[in-house]
Amino acid sequence: MLCEHANSQLIEYAEGVLDTNSQLEIERHVEDCDTCQSDYAAIQQWRSMATNWHQESPPAQQHFMPVAHSNHSNWWGTLRHWFPTFASATALVLVTVMYVQQTQSSGVLPSNTAINYDSLPKLPQATQAAVVDSVLKTSRDQRQAELSTLLKILTAEMNRRSADTENSLRYIISTQIQGQKELDLLYGQLEVLLANPENTALLSTPDEGVSQ
Amino acid sequence: MLATVTDETLVSRAIAGSDSAWNKLIKRYEKRVYNYALRMVGHPQDALDMTQEVFMGVHRNLAGFRGDGAFPAWLFRIASYRCTDYLRRRRNHQQFDDERGFISNLPGPQEQAFTTHANHQISTALQQLPVEQRQVVELKFFQHFTFEDIAGQLGISPNTAKTRLYSALRKLKQHEELRDAL
Ligand SMILES: [Zn+2]
């Protein structure tokens, strides 16, 4: 058997998945070929290392505090904290407006800026409503571009959240997915709202909108 | 003997909205994915982050699982994608050295982060490989996928997968630390 044929089948040979004839032919070739001998030894070394790997467990959980109340790095909990009585979709719109205002000169939202939600001002409801009104008056296309960028920022924040919490892996995953569901729901609501600015009755809080 | 619910059944229940089916699916694979992530990134906290991203990706794409292949092969397609993405993002935080190329500002895998000396050595050895080679070594030797599966998972041809594996083998052949891991 030619070296190139034998060499390219060394893994299958090591796994013992070839037919008996090929197994024998390769065995004979390997005996006389330094390259194949050396490659075969390396393959066996990795196979035995894989066997020697001792299954690790995810890092021990320090505490089981629910993520939503653990700390300020949780943007979703923080958003809710700011706007306890107002529809959360409005909060999203409001945050969008603030970013638009902050970055008026460039016209685009920052994509890599670390967001400090704590620095955003708390506004009275009347002001919030006024801001929302003004958002609804800007062009639909622009709003959608802004919202989609905001959504990316929020999603990135959401993905980063775990670095600061060391809670149960499974708990974090399911919580994040719940957050994703909420975000999807809100985004859907926002789209409807943007299409029909007068129809504010469609707004609901995530708690009402997502069955628990 | 208790009959085990198949992955496919759990997936379709999870798609239909069953949280308990989804939790069972995570529980079934979280250790395997976490250990995969640990070998790929070398640090427990990074591995935890990556595991989480993998399951996020799995959940988002669950409806795309057609059931025409095995669930693990499909899961590791997502895992490979998330892993490449994760390591690319991490590399963006590394410094570029004119002579040595990208150098990590993270320390190598810490001995105390692993339960056994062998695990530490294996992880250290894997970190010597470029990501593309490390992935093939992982998927072949630790996950036991076929080259066809690996090709699908990495979006390359089976031949390319094999070539990468051989490059990795030759690169690590003389690696001192490997001897201790045996
Ligand atoms: Zn040969």
Image (tube, coloured by chain):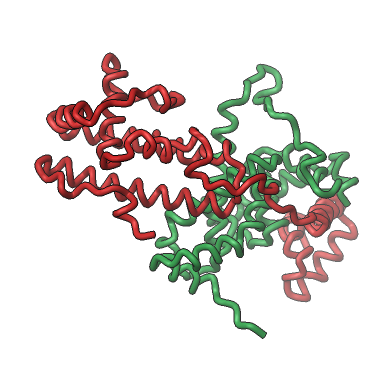
Chain colours: A red, B green
**Residue B42, located in which quarter of the rendered image?**
top right
**Residue A40, located in which quarter of the rendered image?**
bottom right
Picture residue at 17% right of the left edge, 40% below the top: A194
Above-or-below relation of B105 to B9: above
User: How many numbered dots are placed on residues in this image?
Assistant: 0
Q: Position of residue B91 (x, y in %)?
A: 59, 30
> A81 or B161: nearer the eye?
A81
Which residue of the protein is positioned furthest toward the left in this rendering?
Answer: A198
Q: Position of residue A116 (x, y in %)?
A: 44, 25
The answer, for residue B154, to whether it is visible in the render is yes
> A208 or A41: nearer the eye?
A208
Above-or-below relation of A13 to A197: below
Which residue of the protein is positioned furthest toward the bottom in this rendering?
Answer: B1
Quadrant of the image containing the N terminus of chain B: bottom right
User: Relative to B111, is B24 on the left or the right?
Assistant: left
The answer, for residue A152, to whether it is visible in the render is no
Picture residue at 28% right of the left edge, 26% below the top: A123
Picture residue at 59% right of the left edge, 51% below the top: A169
Q: Position of residue A53 (x, y in %)?
A: 79, 54
Picture residue at 77% right of the left edge, 69% below the top: A16
> A124 or A116: nearer the eye?
A124
Q: Position of residue B134 (x, y in %)?
A: 68, 45
